[in-house]
Amino acid sequence: MGLFQKRDKFADKLIADMSDKQRKEKANRLEEQREDVVRRIEKLMVRISRETRMRRLRDRKYPLGDAPNDRDPEE
């Protein structure tokens, strides 16, 4: 994680106690964190595929953002 990481201001709050806006902000922040993790995994898989010379390790069925459980950009 980075040095200047955003602090989650809703980390201590229960979901039931949050407003709709706060829930959406928290969901967006969690999605951003998930995308960061996916990007880090993809970089690692590219490095592993270079070292092992197995190209199939770097290929994904769906690119980031197009996978079935990725969030819609319109939301």
Image: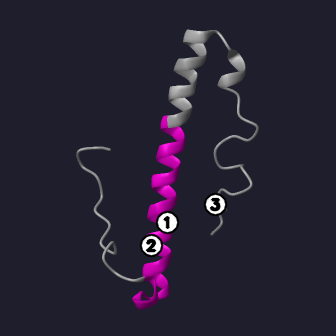
Q: Secondary structure at mark 3?
A: loop
Quarter residue 70 falls in: bottom right
Magenta part of the chain: 15-40
Q: Secondary structure at mark 2?
A: helix
Q: Amino acid at mark 3?
A: Pro
Judge whether 26 appears above or below 60 on screen.
below
Residue 57 drawn at (x, y percent)? 67, 24
User: Is 41 displayed left or right of 57 in the figure?
Assistant: left
Amino acid on which disc 2 is placed: Glu
| Mark 3, residue position | 73
Is 39 part of what is drawn in magenta? yes
Residue type at tag 1: Asn
Local secondary structure at mark 1? helix
Magenta segment main secondary structure: helix
| Location of residue 62 in the rendering, given as x and y in whole percent from the top left corner | 74, 41
Q: Nearer the viewer, mark 3 or mark 2?
A: 2
Give the camera-side residue of 74 and 29.
Answer: 29
Q: Name the residue: 62% across, 69% down.
A: 75
Is the residue under label 1 in contact with that under label 2 (CB below 8 Å)? yes
Residue lying at the far left of the rendered structure = 3
The residue to which callout 2 is attached is: 25
Alpha carbon separation for disc pair 2 and 1: 5 Å
